[in-house]
Image (cartoon, helix red, strand yellow):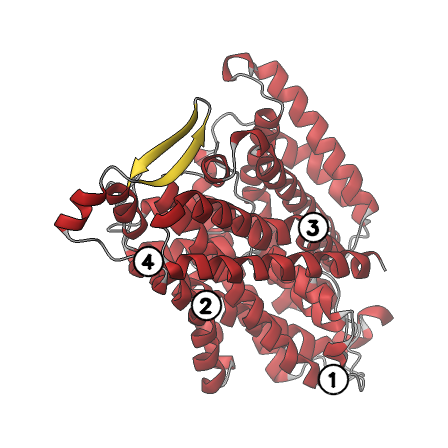
């Protein structure tokens, strides 16, 4: 019942995020980290203190949290659930997780960071074209990241209260089993958007690589050829364990890409309109700096960036897994892991978005590497690195989507024959490729996916689950928890508003 992961990036992304700090002023680093931790402080105040032994005995028979399952409504004791709020595991028992805080931070950062960050410069370009537009954009990136961190933490605390082990089971135990298909299907569709984005990026990247070597191969031919000869065989593998070593090399490529973008930003190779790089570029990809600066953030087009961030920060369906794997998973330790990880991710997002936008202004492509000249050897290696990363992580995301679809269709595991799985592989990959051939704007997929499913998974569903959980706790819920329901529902309302406006702007 665990939702599949959308973003599959590995270990060196943490180094990449730290490396990007040198390009930001110290004041930005400090304020951003504090912003990501601010909302998490609310969750710490909502943790009830363990009662004394005498009070626990007096209230042991009083239901603290009423849970709904297939057999009806059941209740658990106050002592078990109070301990469960402070420490994870099976409904109040200490968690069996073995991951240290540093390992959790490392893995969460690599789970948040992905190739989607390379579309964020286009999100800024959606409303501005002067470099000062990067200032409010950085504030938006930090603010949305802080709210995303709060809701990630909230999901972990929901698991502590309910004993849930996955996003879907958290919904089942708080809201009810009859509607659990809603978050389950949302996760599957969101994963479909992920592999669609992968296919789009691979088509663009390989077409550019062919041009680098003097070959004229269209995006369509490059994508079809890659899908038939490479992606299809990889997606039909029965055991994906052999692909794990390649993910590390892929992240090394992402590190290289960030460094290369920084070099090109600071050496101003694209600032001279008569340079060989700029003369080699299509007109719609050349740097275009105008006069729409910081004040342009008040345009409705800014919602495009906001919704793209809902996709970029998406890792929430894996929050239960992270919480249960944390060693000695007290809420204080959990919040430290989440706040630090999202703080690092926020700084990395700001660095990439600002460097890309400040280089190309209003002409930032939905996939920023498309802006760089095919004669630019430094960025050519970056394209190779990103392509290598995506090819070998593609099957991991694809299998998540395929298996999730089988779960949605309620196909028993014993009926999942090789023939049935292969046929479903052909269908899904065919649909993904057909859509990727038609849709060429990665920023649209990021914005639309974030406006709809991203906002639901990050803002709306966690708030609904938390509200139901606190309501079921009755008198056992603390005043802080009851007050926090209003904060969670406020974020849900904001997420819905973002989604409505963002969807409209994505299509316009």
The residue beneath circle 4 is 47
User: Mark 3 to mark 1: distance in Å?
Assistant: 27 Å
Measure the C-alpha gap from mark 1 to mark 2: 27 Å
Label 2 vs label 4: CA separation?
14 Å
Residue 96 visible from this viewpoint: no
In the rendered image, which residue does mark 2 sit on? 39
In the rendered image, residue 160, in percent from the top left (x then y), is placed at 35, 46
Residue on which disc 1 sits = 295
Q: Position of residue 443 (x, y in %)?
A: 73, 59
Q: Is residue 271 above or below residue 388?
A: below
Confirm or deny contact between disc 4 and disc 3 (CB under 8 A).
Answer: no
Image position, residue 331 (x, y; %): 32, 56
Q: Residues within 10 Å of mark 1 (few under 14, many from 20)?
A: few
Can you identify the residue that label 3 sits on?
A: 452
Mark 4 packing: few (<14 Cα in 10 Å), some, or many (20+)?
many
CA gap, disc 4 and disc 3: 31 Å
Could you give the CA–CA distance between mark 2 and mark 3, rounded to whole angstroms? 23 Å
The Cα–Cα distance between marks 4 and 1, rounded to whole angstroms, is 40 Å
Q: Earlier in the sequence, mark 3 or mark 1?
A: 1
**Residue drawn 26% across and 41% down?**
80
């Amino acid at each position: 019942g665990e939702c599949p992961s959308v973003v599959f990036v590995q270990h060196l992304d943490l180094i990449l995020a730290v490396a990007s700090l040198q390009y930001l002023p110290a004041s930005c680093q400090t304020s951003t980290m504090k912003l990501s931790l601010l909302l998490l402080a609310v969750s710490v105040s909502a943790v009830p203190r363990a009662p004394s032994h005498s009070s626990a005995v007096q209230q042991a028979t009083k239901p603290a949290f009423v849970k709904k399952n297939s057999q009806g409504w059941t209740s658990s004791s106050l002592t078990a659930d109070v301990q469960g709020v402070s420490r994870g595991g099976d409904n109040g028992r200490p968690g069996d997780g073995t991951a240290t805080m540093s390992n959790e931070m490392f893995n969460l950062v690599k789970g948040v960071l992905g190739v989607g960050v390379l579309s964020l410069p286009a999100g800024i370009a959606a409303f501005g074209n002067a470099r000062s537009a990067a200032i409010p954009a950085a504030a938006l990136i930090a603010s949305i990241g802080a709210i995303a961190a709060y809701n990630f933490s909230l999901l972990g605390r929901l698991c502590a209260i309910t004993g849930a082990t996955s996003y879907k089971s958290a919904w089942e135990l708080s809201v009810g089993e009859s509607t659990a298909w809603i978050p389950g299907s949302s996760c599957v569709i969101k994963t479909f958007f992920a592999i669609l984005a992968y296919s789009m990026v691979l088509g663009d990247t390989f077409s550019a690589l062919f041009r680098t070597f003097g070959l004229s191969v269209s995006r369509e031919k490059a994508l079809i050829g890659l899908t038939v000869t490479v992606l299809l065989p990889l997606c039909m593998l029965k055991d994906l364990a052999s692909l794990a070593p390649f993910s590390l090399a892929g992240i090394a490529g992402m590190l290289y890409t960030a460094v290369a973008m920084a070099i090109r930003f600071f050496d101003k190779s694209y600032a001279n309109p008569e340079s060989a790089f700029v003369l080699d570029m299509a007109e719609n990809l050349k740097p275009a700096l105008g006069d729409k600066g910081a004040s342009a953030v008040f345009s409705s087009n800014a919602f495009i960036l906001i919704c793209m961030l809902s996709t970029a920060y998406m890792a929430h369906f894996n929050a239960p897994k992270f919480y249960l794997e944390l060693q000695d998973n007290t809420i204080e330790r959990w919040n430290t892991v989440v706040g630090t990880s999202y703080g690092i991710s926020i700084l990395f997002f700001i660095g990439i978005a600002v460097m890309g936008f400040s280089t190309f202004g209003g002409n930032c492509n939905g996939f920023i590497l498309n802006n760089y000249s095919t004669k630019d050897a430094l960025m050519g290696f970056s394209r190779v690195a990103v392509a290598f990363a995506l090819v070998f992580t593609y099957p991991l995301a694809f299998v998540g989507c395929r298996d999730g679809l089988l779960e949605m269709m309620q196909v028993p595991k014993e009926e999942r024959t090789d023939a049935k799985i292969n046929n479903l592989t052909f269908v899904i990959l065919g649909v993904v490729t057909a859509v990727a051939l038609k849709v060429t704007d990665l920023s649209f997929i990021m914005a639309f996916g974030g406006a709809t499913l991203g906002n639901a998974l990050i803002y709306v569903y966690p708030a609904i689950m938390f509200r139901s959980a606190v309501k079921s706790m009755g008198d056992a819920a603390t005043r802080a928890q009851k007050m926090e329901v209003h904060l969670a529902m406020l974020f849900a309302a904001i997420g819905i508003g973002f989604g409505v406006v963002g969807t409209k702007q994505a299509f316009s």
